[in-house]
Amino acid sequence: MGKQKSAPDLTLLAVTIALLVIGLIMVYSASAAWASYRFSDSFFFAKRQLFFGGTGVLLMFVMMRLDYWVWRTYSKILLIVCFALLVIVLIPGVGLVRGGAQSWLGVGAFSIQPSEFMKMAMIIFLAKFLADHQKWIVTIKKGLVPSLGLVLLAFALIMMQPDLGTGAVMVGTCTVMVFTAGARIKHFVALGLIGVFGFVALIASAPYRIQRITSFMDPWSDPLGSGFQIIQSLLAIGPGGLLGMGLGESRQKYFYLPEPQTDFIFAILAEEMGFLGGVTVLLLFAILYWRGIRIALGAPDLFGSFLAIGIITMIAIQVMINIGVVTGLMPVTGITLPLLSYGGSSLTLMLVSIGVLLNISRHAR
């Protein structure tokens, strides 16, 4: 490894802070009415977002100074702990149920989502495996089965909650990592066909998922049921026009669009800040992705390169899925928009992962 540089990627750091600030403003704007009605405090969600964001930023700076090779050393321990948490959260009476999924551990409002930790742990472990055994990745027995077998086991545990969105992000991220490591196209085609059949089976096994697909195809077929969120999201984006209705002037946040501060925060942003505001946020994410790819290409070793690819791919997939859902291009999945949506575990872990990425940039060529 080369000597650590004094400065991280300042562009990546600036874009991250910019998105975080935009997110804090939009969380307050989107949640003020609901927070006033439910908690008699319009700043309820904003204050919590500030706490989690502030904690995340502190941890990001810690990770930025902590040599990323530490994660290589403890990759197996992290993975085992996260697998244990995924099992514990499924125990009746232990795991907390929110939004129909038993995905949380904790007490009351202060809780963690083990599946969020598993995404990062799997990226770290897979980066080490690929760095140590890259020559095996062209084989099925020694390469693909060991690397993707653990991913599918974690996916199965996450689906038992169930949480298809988080599981899909993890599988998609790890698949990209394996592909960039040099896996053969024909193997991916075979795995892709198996994956399609498996995905269809998952949808068919749960009536609510079928409803999400049908509402995606024609939300107006059930405007007050499965198509409600998509319709309300589009009704927010449409009136925004070029410049928007003005910050704080959203109409859909007044109990029309469910939970506007989480999965559908981009719809409120587009309504209030318009097309230009939405494009600005997408450009910031594009810059974030560009800097992440540059860091991956300049990493001094394979572990750093695969780790950077995993982190930036995870962020990119979440952005694409969230924006796709909000604009009606994808079925509803329950994925938050990184750095913008209200959240505890998701926001903190996202900032921690960016901190790791910033540390890799300090070593990059």
Image (cartoon, rainbow, N blue to C red):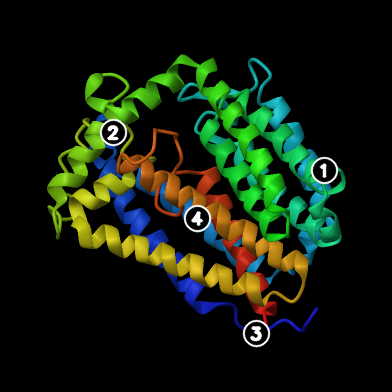
The amino acid at mark 1 is Pro
User: First in sequence: mark 1 or mark 2?
Assistant: 1
Look at mark 4 in the image and give the residue it sits on. 316
Task: For the C terminus, give its image quadrant.
Answer: bottom right
The amino acid at mark 3 is Ser
Which of discs 1 and 2 lies nearer the camera? The answer is 1
Up the image or down, 295 lies above or below 260; here it is below
Task: For the N terminus, give its image quadrant.
Answer: bottom right
User: First in sequence: mark 4 or mark 2?
Assistant: 2
Q: What residue is shown at x 64% (from left), y 43% (from top)?
A: 189
Look at mark 2 in the image and give the residue it sits on. 230
Give the distance between the C-alpha atoms of the residues marked 3 and 1, in whole angstroms: 38 Å
Give the distance between the C-alpha atoms of the residues marked 3 and 2, in whole angstroms: 47 Å
Position in image of residue 298 (x %, y %): 66, 77
The amino acid at mark 2 is Ile
Look at mark 1 in the image and give the residue it sits on. 146
Label 3 residue SS: loop
320 and 70: which is toward the camera: 320
36 and 273: which is toward the camera: 273
Look at mark 3 in the image and give the residue it sits on. 6
Position in image of residue 279 (x %, y %): 29, 61
User: First in sequence: mark 1 or mark 4?
Assistant: 1
Give the distance between the C-alpha atoms of the residues marked 1 and 2, in whole angstroms: 39 Å
Which of discs 3 and 2 lies nearer the camera? The answer is 2
- Is disc 3 in contact with disc 2, using a CB cutoff of under 8 Å? no
Regarding residue 157, the answer to whether it shows in the image is: yes
Give the distance between the C-alpha atoms of the residues marked 4 and 2, in whole angstroms: 22 Å
Give neighbour class at mark 3: few <14, some 14-19, many 20+ (Cα, 10 Å): few
**Residue at the extreme front of the image, as rendered:** 186
